[in-house]
Amino acid sequence: MPALPPRLAERLLQWCLRDSASSAYIVGDLRQDFASLRERRGRVVASMWYWREVIAVGFRYVASPSILTDAGSDLRAAIRVFRSAPGFAFAVVFTLALGLGANATMFGAVDRILLSPPEHVVDHEDLRFVYHSGLGSRSINGPLSYSFPDYESIRDLPVLDGAAAYRPRRVLTMGSGPDARRAIMQGATAEFFPLLGVLPGHGRFFDATDDRAGAPPVAVLGHGFWDREFGQNPDVLGRTVTLGSHTYEVIGVAPKGFTGAQLEAVDVWVPVRMNVPLTTSWEALASRGAWWYRVIVRLSDGVSDEDAERMMTDAHTAGVTAAVEAGEGNLRNGVGATLHTGAFMMALGPNSDTDTAITLWLAGVSILVLLIACANVTNLMLARGIDRQRERAVRLAFGVSRRRLMTQAFAEALVLAAAGGLAAVFVARWSGQALYSLMLPGIPLPESPIDLRLVAFITGVVLLATVVAGMLPAVQAMKTAPGDVLRRSSRGATGGSRARDLLTLGQVSLSTVLLVGAGLFVQSLNETLRADTGFDHDSLVNVILEQETVDAALRDQLHREARTTLRSLPGVDDVILSSSQRPLYGWDEQSSLIPSRLDSLPRLPDGGPFTYAGTEGYVETAGLRILQGRGFTTNDYNNDAPFALMVSRSFAEGAWPGLDPLRECVTLQRGVIELDGPEPCRPVVGVYEDLIVRSLGDEGIWSVTWPIPRDAPGLRGILVRVQGDPADYVQSIRDRLTTLSSEIRYVHVLPMSDRIDRMRGSWKVGATLFSVFGLLALVVASLGLYSVLAFAVARRSREIGIRSALGAQRRDLVSMVVARAARLIGVGLILGVGMAALMGRSLQAVLFGVPAVNPLVFSIVAVVLVGAGLLAAWVPAWKATSIDPVGAMAAE
């Protein structure tokens, strides 16, 4: 049997020669030459020679001047066709621009949040965040929080190829007075940058000689900070930057776009071992109570996550056990902890939050919009192709080749694809910055939201939606005899109506799902606006004085002077001082409280109890809602008054179920003032409503509040009650206090409503983007419904003309068209509501105070969708009434 050439190459050759009379001779000659060359020089050389000959033949026959001339003629003809049907061309391009452009933008944002590691990180597949379970934590970072000894106990394990720790960002002040500005600092170990595989953009990163106690203070600048503060001056190395009370020498600049291990803005990186002793008066690096750090590890080759988790847990347990035996603090909760590895993209790890869940839902929503847009384009292309079946049949009857008709159909689809793709790229580029700013506030944005992957994605979808859909009617026309097509056309047969109706049903049902989701998120956002925070936050302002000195007596004096100054400010109702910089934000003091009737506190899943203490008027100024008993009286703030405190509702119910809390007391092992003897058990004088601490979904939070005596030390925060909008007082408060003393470097003025508003961020993003995509789906679906009905009216013009000539009334003709739309809308609405109800169980987790199956939302969506659909149907229906019977029949 003779050797045959590569099958794919021979098929390509036959396709190139399909219209040539000498096709059989050329194929046979090349096959013989291939067999001869293979015997002499082998199959590889023969195959390469054959492919070269195929390419040469293809260029000679396919890319001949006549072929190129025909291609140019087809493209010009395609453009002329769309110029003659601008409505159709606009509908396709508009649908692709909105549906695909918005989808591409959303894909880019989701890719940055969930799929792609931070820029410049190398081999992120081997990197893991370390999590823990069963470890009592007093940190808001929960299962990601570790002490520095926890990190050191696992960093040298043989199952790890490297480990690093970093402290989540801290906001510090540069400069002082009116010129003061804020900078975000992150402390990291020397292993941090090498572990991530990041190279400096300028200068160098810090190493082990820099990352040690007593080392000269050095810093690495973020690229954005370098640009903002130093104008990208290459001579920045060796210069200094002052953050807080300390000055650091600049040794390097991070590469552009690098945000560390997470997507968060960082201005300056400093070595942990150098900086913590510099800024902290106690041995925080040696304490297992300073849960400030997050740990990243890189697994060694061939090591499974299970093996790494087992060895890390054993090492951690051994370290904690040794610390307990040495008498270090209260570490009883740490002995039974289990360490886990999680994905380096934190959004995919076990600590993912509502933001991640909503992002995933928005990714699904964008896919639904894409499906609706593709269905609409397919519907339009099918309608257009069917409408031209008569034209193609006539051309076939006059001798035009089928190949020529196919190339013309391809050219028309290609022109549409190019226009739609360019429009989609424009929309994606225009909307990308806005979307990134909404979903990733404060994160350095890419130079362009469009990259090669997005361009490839847009190109593939556009070609699939237009070229394939545009070619199907042409292929069908090639298989049908011209006479049959002309006979069906003369009877007004439309063909393909079932496929177009199914596509329209799909658009309506998917639009229903999106509109229901938008309604649920909007209602969730409304519920967050009405959420009970437990205190009156609307007119409350938190003020923090950042001072040069750490002298406690001077700090107390400045706070008391600040209170006097602010009380004289017009519009200020009251000012109180607190032992915490951020009153009502809470601090977890679980080991310091013992309620009566209990030997110790139970482990609270949400942390706590959180403690609040303030000077006279604290309860009233904070707006705590008293449920039982009383607030603090003037006598409670006297230095020699009996101690008293108040507890939250959940504290009272959890510590003393079924008992009267006003007959109980709580011992504070660490109080506001130092006592010579043991701390007495403070009587509970009142119970107030639970306060939110971390999120609007907080439930059952335990907290305790007590009065600070008039002359007690330890003042750190200020709480101001104002009249009207707190934002109107921010600048005036800052101006008054900045000039109070040269010791005050910066005055932080934080409206409490801003803090609560940040808690609503997830639902704001969800409501905004669900609404945008829902509106987009409604527009595209309405356009699709209109196009289907308009096409149907055009195809039935002869029938409508006859009905009109026989005396049909205008309302009858309108009803005939609208009835079909009503059927499509009704069936699509029923399917969409069913899909939305099934989706509700999964969506419930990211809603706030709203049932997923919500009759009110479903009813509003039904009214909106029916109204938009009937309006889209009314236009072609009204046009149907103006058809001239004589003209319609004459045209046929």
Image (cartoon, rainbow, N blue to C red):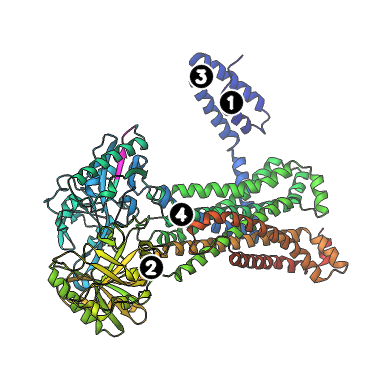
Which mark, by number, is residue 43? 3
Q: Is residue 752 visible?
A: yes
Mark 2 or mark 1, which has the lower sequence index? 1
Discs 2, 1 touching: Cβ within 8 Å = no
Which mark, by number, is residue 357? 4
Mark 3 or mark 1, which has the lower sequence index? 1
**What range of the chain is rendered magenta?**
296-301
Secondary structure of the residue carrying tag 1 is: helix
- Label 1 belongs to which residue? 7
Mark 2 or 1, closer to the camera: 2
Residue found at the far right of this picture: 806
**553 up-or-down from 158: above or below:** below
Mark 4 or mark 2, which has the lower sequence index? 4
**803 up-or-down from 711: above or below:** above
Secondary structure of the residue carrying tag 3 is: helix
Left or right, 38 with respect to 505, comes to left
Mark 3 or mark 4, which has the lower sequence index? 3
Q: CA distance from mark 3 to mark 1?
A: 13 Å
Q: Is residue 154 visible?
A: no
Discs 3, 1 touching: Cβ within 8 Å = no
- Label 2 belongs to which residue? 649
Q: Is residue 297 in the magenta section?
A: yes
